[in-house]
Image (spheres, coloured by chain):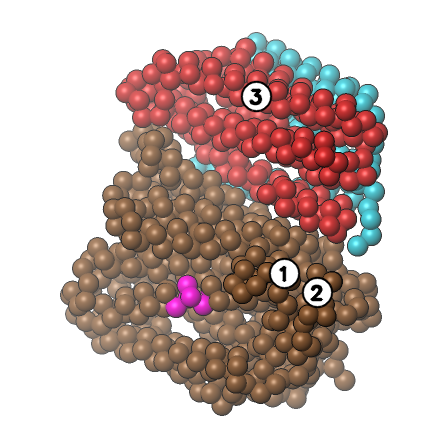
Chain colours: A cyan, B brown, C red
Amino acid sequence: MEKSNTGHTAAGFKTYIITWIALVMLTALTIAVTKFEFGAASILVALAIASVKSGLILYFFMHLRYENWFFKLAFLLPILVFALSIWFTFLDVWYR
Amino acid sequence: MKEDRENRKADRGFWIYEGGKTGLFSWIFTTDHKRIGILYLTSLAVFFAAGVTFGILMRLELISPGKTIMSASTYNSIFTVHGVIMIFLFIIPGIPVSLGNFLLPLQIGARDVAFPRINLLSWWLYIAGGIIALLSLFTGTGPPDTGWTFYAPYSIRTGTNVSLAVFAAFVLGFSSILTGMNFITTIHRLRAPGMTWFRIPLFVWTLYATAWVQILATPILAITLLLIILERFFGMGLFDPAKGGDPVLYQHLFWIYSHPAVYIMIVPAMGVVTEIIPVFARRTVFGYKAIAFSSIGIAAVGFFVWGHHMFTSGISDTSKVIFSLLTFLVAIPSGIKVFNWVASLYKGSIKVDTPLLYVISFIFLFCIGGLTGLINGTLATNIHIHGTHFIVAHFHYVMFGGTAFAFFAGIHYWFPKIFGRMYSEARAKLAWLFLFIGFNVLYFPMFIVGWQGMPRRYYDYLPEFHNLNFISTTGSWILAVGLILLFANLIRSVRKGEIAGSNPWKGTTLEWTVPSPPPVENFEEIPTVTHGPYKYE
Amino acid sequence: MEDTLNNTAEHHRDYTGAKMGMWLFLFTEMLLFGGMFILYAVYRFEYPADFHTAAKELDTTLGAVNTLILLTSSLTMALSIAALQKNRKRLSLVFQVVTMLLGAAFLGNKYVEWGAKIHHGIYPNSGHLLSLGKGQILFYGLYFIMTGLHGLHVLIGIGVFLFMFYFTKSGTVAEDNSVKLENAGLYWHLVDIIWVFLFPLFYLIT
């Protein structure tokens, strides 16, 4: 049971504030792009922006950048399970 | 904990320790993984007994065509309750929470699990879920009659007490999630020095794979069950065709959890089997890594085969073909395990004591259950046998013949460790004989009547199925005698058995290095591990 | 539950273990909402026009304001941990209070929003809603369940922060032992992430 450093990563206030500014700007962007017609792709644009925002929150706010390999890798598991579940469900819905 | 060490008597280990609390409170508020394991073992036995009782009643109704002892609606409720209890209260928690809780820290050289208090909370949630499930039988508008799958839209419309039963399953799911979280963290963080990933016993590997499935699949069930409750109270319409909802989507969501749940049930059982074989064959296990990775493989592929429960639900042909294909893929890691077990026995100095007897029956029964699973997974034959007793026979061969037999094997194997005493070998073997014969007499005829077309979940059947159903019901009595003998022998031995000593089987995993029963702190000193788990000369 | 988790962690002083437990719990949260997103995806695929019409009824401004509120609360959350780790306890407490207030403001907005919908006769199983297209019934069904479940998580988060405030004040959570607060923060950020997806999927369908 070694004592790990993860409890003691003192990130600066500045990083967090910059992250927040980026998040607010991305929110503005996701609202702004609704003015344009992307057709069916609009949901992809919205999801892409939302994913970038989540990435920022995960990486900076949730300290994923300081964590060891387990956290970074394990995080992909629920995403993989979700993505594949939705894909397999759509194999039914799409071709029904 | 440490300050109370002098209180314990050496030979009773954790059974004596009471740590400030007395009597019942020293049990139901304990954070000792061993005591929580015992709590679970006891509660599982109670729910198992209830489930068996309902099962025997069902068989009694089916002893002859027409109404025998109960009405159609009572029969519907009883098979629902039998399913709910056996699935959610016995076999899903089953091996991990009882044997797993007791042995995981011992096998990896730890003093407890990572979150002892959450471990206790899991048990409390489990008991709460169990009580709510039982309440759903006696309160409200009658026991649920949907089958354990709670299929929409019937589960939304039926007047029976479905909401409470569903809520029980929801609470039990939460308990399961917390156990999974606890085990993963324990295995990552609390292994003894030198206990590398390929030195942990294979039972721990299976617990690890299972815990991941618990974490990643259970929440989907939680939300699905929550939706059923919301539908019933507010009429949201998500699964109601009249409001645009799609009942088949309910089935998707349900099986996204409930198929992986099948692997929550069977994979730890495979772990138990893998622990026992090397000890009674006196040689190291064949293909350690193959067995370890096949556990992970089964867990991973098992996530994406759920559609094979829905071949007749009107899902698209494309998805049927893919789900069928993936179903066959699961057979590969399962097959790897079976071959490894057999290879581990090959040229060993085999001693057929009770645990190995159960293990060998496990392999035999699991093979029947597994191979008939491939028949079910084939698209064309599935149409013929879907919803018949063939399916009932198949999953009882896997779940009862597989998981429960492995559970019995594990209980007999670790009994001397847990209780410090040995059971009567002759009586245990007699109980096994009754169980094994009873089991096959009970379930094998179901393959035949199912193939001939007798549907499941009906209290009545055509006269031509009478003979086989009669044989099957007779089997249920033989099985019941076997269970009574088994439990009577074990319960008697808790007090009257011979003192077992710390390592009666000459096992080589860490739990056999500590006294039986283990002391409160498990290890006087945390061991340093220098070799793999199964080292025999 | 966070409470037990972290007390134990504190007992063992295994920071990584405590965080690992919390992350695993967050995975289950992700998949809990994941199940709902599967439903959303299928129904949006089946009824694109109805989803479009129904989404127009939602107040984008209110949704955007709530997004800002939640993002800002995530910032103050992160700042309160940073402040504690720099051993500035008072500042950390202030940030925790601001986080809670922002969470409450989010719920206040949600109350106004739901209230307006219900006032217009749009609630599950209402006569008006049933008279709309099937896709709209499903859209609002999902809307109420998903935002409701999310709101419940915000409420639980505020409850957790009340404990954290108490712990920080009493010194149980401190500069050298901040894992409880960090785990509470992880939970809060995840709730934020879920909203980041809910916002475009419900308010911004074009």
**Residue C104 tag number:** 3
Which residue is identified by label 2?
B4
Q: Secondary structure at mark 3?
A: helix
Q: Do marks 1 and 2 share a chain? A: yes
Residue at 44% of width from left, 58% of height from top? B89
- Would residue C130 be found to the left or right of residue B367 on screen? left
Residue span colored magenta: B44-49
Q: Secondary structure at mark 2?
A: helix
Q: Nearer the viewer, mark 2 or mark 3?
A: 2
Is B48 within the magenta? yes
In which chain is the residue bearing label 2? B
Q: Nearer the viewer, mark 3 or mark 1?
A: 1
**Residue B46 tag number:** none
- Would residue B342 be found to the left or right of residue B317 on screen? right
In which chain is the residue bearing label 3? C
Where in the figure is residue C173, as x and y percent of width and height?
Answer: 74, 37
The Cα–Cα distance between marks 3 and 1, rounded to whole angstroms, is 42 Å
For residue B213, above or below residue A33: below
Which residue is identified by label 1?
B20
Is B365 within the magenta? no
Query: Is disc 1 in contact with disc 2, using a CB cutoff of under 8 Å?
Result: yes
Chief SS of the magenta region: helix
